[in-house]
């Protein structure tokens, strides 16, 4: 797969993860749900050397912090 395709997949994954985290932030205890999901996803991506899972974890964190701190 070319680098351009990988980059596009990573960008779309980041946006979808960010939007999902923003929806989850409406739930009570959302920080716990997002925190556990992010840690598990990032750790799995790090051990398998899978960049896509790491990008998803960062997108989840970004989406939640955007909703939590910026409204």
Image (cartoon, rainbow, N blue to C red):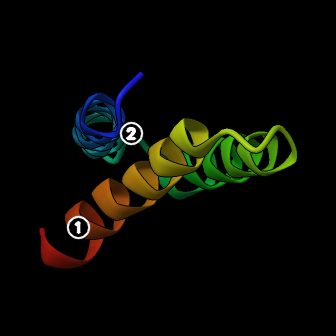
Q: Residue furthest left?
A: 71
Q: Nearest the camera: 42 or 32?
A: 42
Q: Dot 2, crowdedness within 10 Å: few (<14), some or many (≥20)?
A: few
Coordinates of residue 5 in the picture (x, y in percent): 28, 28
Q: Quadrant of the N terminus?
A: top left
Indicate which disc residue 38 carries: none
* Secondary element type, mark 1: helix
Indicate which disc residue 66 carries: 1
Q: Which residue is mark 2?
A: 27
Q: Dot 1, crowdedness within 10 Å: few (<14), some or many (≥20)?
A: some
Please report the residue visible at 77 percent of the width from the left and 51 percent of the height from the top: 46
Q: Is residue 33 left or right of residue 2?
A: right
Q: Nearest the camera: 8 or 67?
A: 8
Please report the residue visible at 68 percent of the width from the left and 41 percent of the height from the top: 41
Q: Is residue 28 left or right of residue 45?
A: left
Q: Which mark is nearer the camera, 2 or 1?
A: 1
Q: Is residue 8 above or below residue 62?
A: above
Coordinates of residue 23 in the picture (x, y in percent): 26, 36
* Residue 41 visible to an observer of this rendering: yes
Q: Residue furthest bottom?
A: 69
Coordinates of residue 53 in the picture (x, y in percent): 59, 38
Q: Nearest the camera: 47 or 42?
A: 47
- Total marks placed: 2
Q: Is residue 57 above or below residue 70?
A: above
Q: Is residue 46 left or right of residue 54?
A: right
């Amino acid at each position: 797969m070319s680098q351009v395709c990988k980059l596009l997949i990573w960008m779309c994954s980041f946006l979808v993860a960010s939007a999902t985290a923003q929806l989850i932030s409406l739930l009570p205890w959302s920080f716990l749900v997002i925190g556990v999901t992010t840690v598990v996803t990032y750790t799995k991506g790090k051990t398998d050397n899978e960049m896509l899972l790491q990008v998803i974890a960062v997108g989840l964190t970004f989406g939640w912090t955007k909703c939590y701190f910026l409204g």
